[in-house]
Image (spheres, coloured by chain):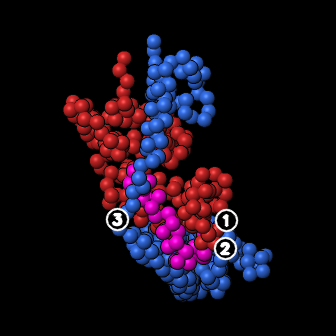
Amino acid sequence: MTHLTVEALLSLREAGLEPGDASARAHLDGCPRCRAELERLHQRVARLKALPALRPSRDRWPQVSARYRVERRNRRQRTAGLIGLAAAASIALGVSLGPRGNPATNPGEQEIQAAMARSQALENALSRYQPDQRVLDGRTAGIAQELEDRIATVDRELEMADLLAQQARDEQVLKLWRERVGLLDALVDVHVTRASNVGL
Amino acid sequence: MTGTQLMDSYLLANAESVVARARAGDEDALEELYRAFEAPVYNLARRICRTTEDAEDVLQETFFEVCRSIGRYREEGSLWGWVRTIAASKALMRLRRNKYRDTDELQEEAVGQRREDTALRMDLEAALERLSETSRAVVWLHDVEGYTHDEIAGMMGKTPSFSKSQLARAHQRLRRWLGEEVEG
């Protein structure tokens, strides 16, 4: 007589019916050895579940907490730094456009400047709103977190764009600043609009 | 109420208010979460990882992720289920990173053979420890934590068939090492 394999016995423990389970069950009904094997399997799993819980020998909370604090501080500094960066970039762009006397000769740079100014205005608005000190529901906090992560990605790409050649850099920078403005718009919307809707 | 939701209330009676405070960045609330789930997270990590150091690192990485992502936790499922999935993912990531992973199958074969030769029966704890890391992870996640083969496959980046065959292989070995094989 061919007995059931471990695979077949394990399959019988699953909720759904796999192909071959019906014949395996039929075999099981008439085979005391396979029934005993299945019982041993059940007992083994029960013994696994009953193994004593292992506990850490050291408290790791101080490390978790310290690392989390550093990350929060860095995030705040990054946001504050970016406001400064946007302002400085606007000034620098203004200076570089200045001697030419006619900024309109380079519409791309003008657009970049406008996007930077808009980005800065949005960051200022957000900073005044102090989102870190407000309570959000889980879904909203998740959306805000995702937007912040995407803004951070755009910022990294902006840094990388400095390495590109002039024309490619202008196009890429304009694209990224526009994207940044869009994300910040959404972030302001998430924080401020939602708060006004619920009367915060 | 599901098993994992029951675990929530068992581990942390006032889970809802603690989560709300944790989302607002309250560090005391985050520590309450850590204290509530520290033991089960470590146990899961230790059962999957080879060393206590790895398991403690997984514990730390899990709670760092919990602190960062608590705002993303959707209250549709249980809190323990959410934390546990982070822990399992971190533990499996640690397995993938460890260099000795590729050699432990050979080691397992050698140890298994030696044990059989000397007709030495192991206890369950020792037998579990002797399994390859991948097999042990599948056994623990499936048989103890209750994950399905589809879920395990998703976490491991493998197929459900891989998970099933690892489980079968592990049980064959456990049966042999525990001296449960039936003659005839």
Q: Residues within 10 Å of mark 1 (few under 14, many from 20)?
A: some
Q: Position of residue B148 (x, y in %)?
A: 55, 41
Residue type highlighted by circle 3: Ser
The chain that hosts pointer 3 is: A
Q: Is residue B163 visible?
A: yes
Q: Is residue B109 left or right of residue A8?
A: left
Image quarter for residue B166?
A: top left
- Residue nearest the viewer, comparing A159 with B78: B78
Q: Colour of chain B?
A: red
Q: Which residue is mark 1?
A: A139
State which mark lies toward you, 3 or 2.
3
Instruction: Residue under label 3, please give it.
Output: A57
Secondary structure state at the residue bearing disc 3: loop
Q: Residue A168: image x %, image y %?
A: 51, 65
Q: Residues within 10 Å of mark 3 (few under 14, many from 20)?
A: few
Under circle 2, the secondary element is: loop
Identify residue type, mark 2: Leu
What residue do we see at 58% from left, 27% from top?
A: A18
State the hue of chain A. blue
Please give the range of residues in magenta. Answer: B19-47
Per the rendering, the mark at residue A136 is 2
Asked if B176 appears above or below A185 in the picture, the reply is above
Per the model, the C-alpha gap separating discs 1 and 3 is 36 Å
